[in-house]
């Protein structure tokens, strides 16, 4: 059996085992998810909430943007609080105030002496952590005092989500528009859902001394602190990481000499002989659209960031009336995925016929139809979200056509199906173009097969977004949502990135096909060995039991292992960029690939691992350290790759042009420096400040208006301006560069004469 | 943010002064030796200073709650800033002769001085305010 065959077999085995474990974990989460009561009643039998109200409350929450405005169990936006942590703290304080008045005749708990406080807190702990859910009747029974505390908190939330003047300052601090929820009845339902998510964070599982969310979030009032298993698996995760780095080091030591560059480098650029087919030329419009989406994404990012200092206003304009924070953030995050995905799609469509030299019938028509479909999806889905956030769509239409509220998967279900069908069409178009190469036994077949498999996975795994429905348990939605987000980003995107870059270098004749095939297969095995089960590291606090936490901690640490050696890849790519004289034509695509490796190390590796072990994430989830990782990994790795691929394809689509490289050079450095400044001047220091607050006073405080409205926090948010400005200039320069290829093309001398 | 008003204003003024001074020096160097190392270094230094200048300006608008397109003197400042940056670009990239460079440089300096006067008077007519009968107005809506 050849090395390549062995690696294929190993990869297949690894995927079967990994997905088996992932599905088993899903079953574990399903079994141990927080109980959903049929009724919540007081000890005297009065009804507080029903299951129907809790579920409708969730629909209300989804309709105004869900995770895009504040967060639940740490997942979502960062300006408004985490509603479950916020509710918990308010309810606990309300209960303590009630008891302080009843027991000691005080106006509030704050007036109590140290002894009195200790007594009240002891009582509080035993009351709220006790699980009063009856599995047989489906009823949760609460004390009368607690019911009064809940009513007080519910009144606060009903005021906050309406247009009550008493909470207007808080709305501004949270970047909420007035009447975020349009009707009083819906506001009441919303409190049912918020209460339930909070109940899960402070109530012990039946027969256990940890809560449904593994004691997340930290709350000193009721000893919500990391359980021992979290310490244990955090330490083990670091140990696994070190072991993985050691093993990889050994592998590189024994194998790196074997990976030689081609001894016979081509004298001229082999890609120049390629004559773009009509369908390849038709992909040009994808690159124009992705640039437009990228620019719009930056614009909405700037507005979203600005709302952090002026909650409803943009430099004097009452912008929140029309474009509130929840919609600008929704579009900002959604566009990031869309334009990067657009780069992937276009590259696949361009590469298909380029590899096989075969233009299937009606391929150009297919490429054009898909492009129109994508535009319809973007416009239709975004319009639905805008209507939803303006509360114009009604709860009955929201799930299908409005805003699902699940971050990165928040377009309406109808649009998700449309996109899924679009992705299947894309697979069909790429597959039929690659088919002649895949069918014929050749040296190329393995690497092309891997490239095709990663595109199949990208297309099919979007299907995970279609698994949940309107009333699926939130723990299970989180499970499937991370199938989509994590497996795409930290699984198949990584494989696609590795495969496509290696493939392009083989087409340029810079590395032998066999070497590239083995390297890519090996890299895929390494990425997938941590990446698949590593999905579980997003699910530590969504109702998962300890084994799921242990698996997530251990395997997600392994995801960082290949990133520790990414410098090899960066240098390898950089060297190939200088391998021949004609490679100067590809200098900037290659530089973007080098940037991919850099941000893979910094954004995905360092900033990713910073928040990865369970103990770290316990305190850091949903703080600004999360977008630190998000921005530097998503744009740094996949954004840069998308741009690099776009440039590579544009070289082929417009083959005989002299590129205005000065513009591209400025764009490259602006994008990288801007991203670094964004991370270092704002997100990192602000995240660290929040971390101290979270460790010192509890998670709720790190996310509270009290903390986030400090002058120093405001100053740090303003420090985003230099980085964001430089970054935006980089994007505009990139757009200018690409536009210039059509508007003011400069032809090479020979072509001009011809 | 009002707590940082005086510091932000100081940074804004210092950066404005640095931007003008560097433009003056940069122009002189560019007219003698356009492609030298010093000219390049100055170019990047000016980019950095202008970025800090604009950041401080945006922070000030938020602190004093006065904004371009709402308060006319700030609208004038913003428009002139665009002109100033445009002239700077011409000086760096588009001007091909000594004469063109000199004109761009001179006009950029003139624009900057006028921006200073608008900032000082809080009036769109800036230094021309007394001539046009707007003396004594320090803030315009």
Image (spheres, helix red, strand yellow):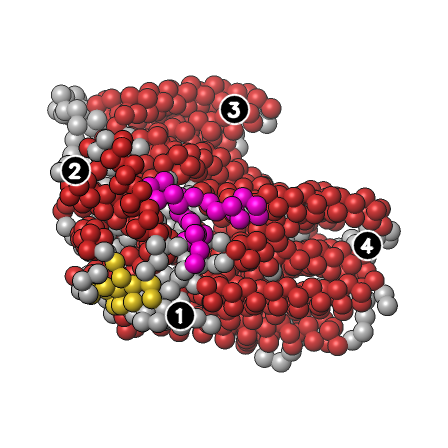
- Using the numbered discs, state the Cα–Cα distance from disc 1 to disc 2 in whole angstroms: 45 Å
Q: Indicate which label's residue lies in the foreground, 4 or 1.
A: 1
Q: Is residue A443 left or right of residue A349?
A: right
Q: Position of residue A717 (x, y in %)?
A: 37, 36
Magenta region's main secondary structure? loop
* Quarter containing the C terminus of chain A: bottom right
Q: Determine if the magenta segment contains residue A222.
A: yes
Circle 3 residue:
B42
Q: Chain of mark 3?
A: B
Q: Determine if the magenta segment contains residue A435.
A: no
Determine the secondary structure under disc 2.
helix
Q: Chain of mark 4?
A: A
Q: Is residue A498 left or right of residue A199?
A: right
Q: Indicate which label's residue lies in the foreground, 4 or 2.
A: 2
Tags 1 and 3 both on a single chain: no
Circle 4 residue:
A266
Q: Position of residue A157 (x, y in %)?
A: 22, 52
Circle 2 residue:
A104
The crowd level at tag 2 (other Cα within 10 Å; few <14, some 14-19, many 20+) is few
Mark 3 vs 4: CB contact within 8 A: no
- Between A84 and A585, the one nearer to me in the picture: A84
* x 48%, y 23%: residue: B27
Determine the secondary structure under disc 4.
loop
Question: Quadrant of residue A335 in the image?
Answer: bottom left
Question: Quadrant of residue A2 in the image?
Answer: bottom right
Q: Is residue A409 visible?
A: no
Mark earlier in primary sequence (4, 1) = 4
* x 42%, y 32%: residue: B51
């Amino acid at each position: 059996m050849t090395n390549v065959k062995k690696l294929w077999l190993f990869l297949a085995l690894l995927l079967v085992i990994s997905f088996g474990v992932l599905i088993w974990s899903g079953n574990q989460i399903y079994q141990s998810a927080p109980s959903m009561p049929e009724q919540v009643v007081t000890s005297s039998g009065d009804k507080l909430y029903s299951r129907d109200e809790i579920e409708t409350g969730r629909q209300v929450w989804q309709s105004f943007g869900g995770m895009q405005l504040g967060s639940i169990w740490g997942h979502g936006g960062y300006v408004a609080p985490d509603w479950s942590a916020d509710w918990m703290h308010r309810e606990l304080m309300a209960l303590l105030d009630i008891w302080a008045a009843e027991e000691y005749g005080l106006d509030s708990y704050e007036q109590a002496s140290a002894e009195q406080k200790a007594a009240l807190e002891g009582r509080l702990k035993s009351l709220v952590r006790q699980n009063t859910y009856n599995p047989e009747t489906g009823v949760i029974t609460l004390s009368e005092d607690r019911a009064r505390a809940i009513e007080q908190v519910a009144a606060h939330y009903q005021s906050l989500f309406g247009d009550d003047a008493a909470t207007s300052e808080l709305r501004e601090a949270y970047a909420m528009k007035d009447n975020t929820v349009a009707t009083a009845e819906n506001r009441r339902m919303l409190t049912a859902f918020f209460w339930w998510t909070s109940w899960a964070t402070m109530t012990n599982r039946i027969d256990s001394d940890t809560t449904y969310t593994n004691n997340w979030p930290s709350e000193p009032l009721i000893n919500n602190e990391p359980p021992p298993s979290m310490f244990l698996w955090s330490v083990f995760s670091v140990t696994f990481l070190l072991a993985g780095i050691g093993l990889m080091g050994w592998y590189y030591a024994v194998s790196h000499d074997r990976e030689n560059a081609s001894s016979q480098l081509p004298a001229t650029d082999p890609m120049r002989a390629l004559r773009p087919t009509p369908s390849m030329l038709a992909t040009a419009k994808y690159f124009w659209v992705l640039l437009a989406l990228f620019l719009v994404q930056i614009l909405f990012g700037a507005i979203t960031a600005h709302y952090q200092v002026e909650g409803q206003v943009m430099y004097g304009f009452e912008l929140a009336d029309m474009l509130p924070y929840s919609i600008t953030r929704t579009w900002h995050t959604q566009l990031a995925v869309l334009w990067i995905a657009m780069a992937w799609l276009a590259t696949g469509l361009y590469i298909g016929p380029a590899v096989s030299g075969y233009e299937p019938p009606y391929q150009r028509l297919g490429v054009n139809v898909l492009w129109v479909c994508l535009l319809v999806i973007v416009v239709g889905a975004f319009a639905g979200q805008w209507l939803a956030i303006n509360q114009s769509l009604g709860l009955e239409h929201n799930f299908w056509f409005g805003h699902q509220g699940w971050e990165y998967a928040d377009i309406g279900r109808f649009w998700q199906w449309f996109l899924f069908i679009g992705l299947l069409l894309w697979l069909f178009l790429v597959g039929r173009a690659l088919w002649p190469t895949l069918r014929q036994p050749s040296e190329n077949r393995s690497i092309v097969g891997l490239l095709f498999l990663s595109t199949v996975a990208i297309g099919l795994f979007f299907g995970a977004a279609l698994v949940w429905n309107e009333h699926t348990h939130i723990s299970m939605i989180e499970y499937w949502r991370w199938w989509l987000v994590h497996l795409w980003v930290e699984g198949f995107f990584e494989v696609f990135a590795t495969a496509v870059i290696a493939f392009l270098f083989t087409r340029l004749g810079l590395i032998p096909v066999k070497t590239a095939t083995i390297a890519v297969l090996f890299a895929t095995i390494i990425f997938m060995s941590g990446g698949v089960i590593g999905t579980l590291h997003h699910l530590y606090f969504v109702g998962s039991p300890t084994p799921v936490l242990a698996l997530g901690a251990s395997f997600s640490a392994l995801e960082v292992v290949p990133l520790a050696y990414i410098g090899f890849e960066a240098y390898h790519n950089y060297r190939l960029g200088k391998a021949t004289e004609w490679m100067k034509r590809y200098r900037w695509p290659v530089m973007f690939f080098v940037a991919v490796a850099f941000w893979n190390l910094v954004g995905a590796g360092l900033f990713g691992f910073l928040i990865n072990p369970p103990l770290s994430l316990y305190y850091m989830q949903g703080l600004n350290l999360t977008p630190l990782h998000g921005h530097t990994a998503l744009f740094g790795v996949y954004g840069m790759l998308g741009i690099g691929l776009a440039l590579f394809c544009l070289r082929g689509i417009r083959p005989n042009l002299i590129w205005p490289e000065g513009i591209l050079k400025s764009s490259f450095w602006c994008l990288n420096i801007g991203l670094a400044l964004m991370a270092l001047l704002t997100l990192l220091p602000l995240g660290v400040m929040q971390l101290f607050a979270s460790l010192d006073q509890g998670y709720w405080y790190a996310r509270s208006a009290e903390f986030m409205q400090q002058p120093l926090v405001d100053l740090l948010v303003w420090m985003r301006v230099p980085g964001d400005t430089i970054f935006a200039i980089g994007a505009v320069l990139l757009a200018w560069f690409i536009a210039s290829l059509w508007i003011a093309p400069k032809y090479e001398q020979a072509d001009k004469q011809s | 943010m009002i707590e940082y008003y005086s510091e932000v204003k100081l940074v804004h003024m210092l950066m404005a002064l640095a931007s003008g001074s560097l433009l003056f020096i940069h122009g002189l160097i560019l007219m003698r030796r356009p492609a030298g190392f010093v000219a390049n270094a100055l170019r990047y230094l000016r980019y950095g200073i202008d970025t800090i200048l604009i950041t401080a300006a945006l922070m000030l608008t938020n602190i004093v709650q006065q904004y371009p397109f709402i308060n006319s003197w700030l609208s004038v400042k913003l428009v002139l800033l665009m002109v100033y940056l445009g002239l700077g670009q011409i000086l760096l990239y588009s001007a091909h002769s000594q004469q063109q460079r000199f004109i761009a440089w001179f006009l950029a300096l003139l624009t900057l001085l006028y921006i200073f006067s608008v900032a000082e008077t809080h009036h769109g007519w800036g230094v021309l305010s007394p001539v046009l009968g707007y003396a004594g107005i320090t803030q315009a809506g």
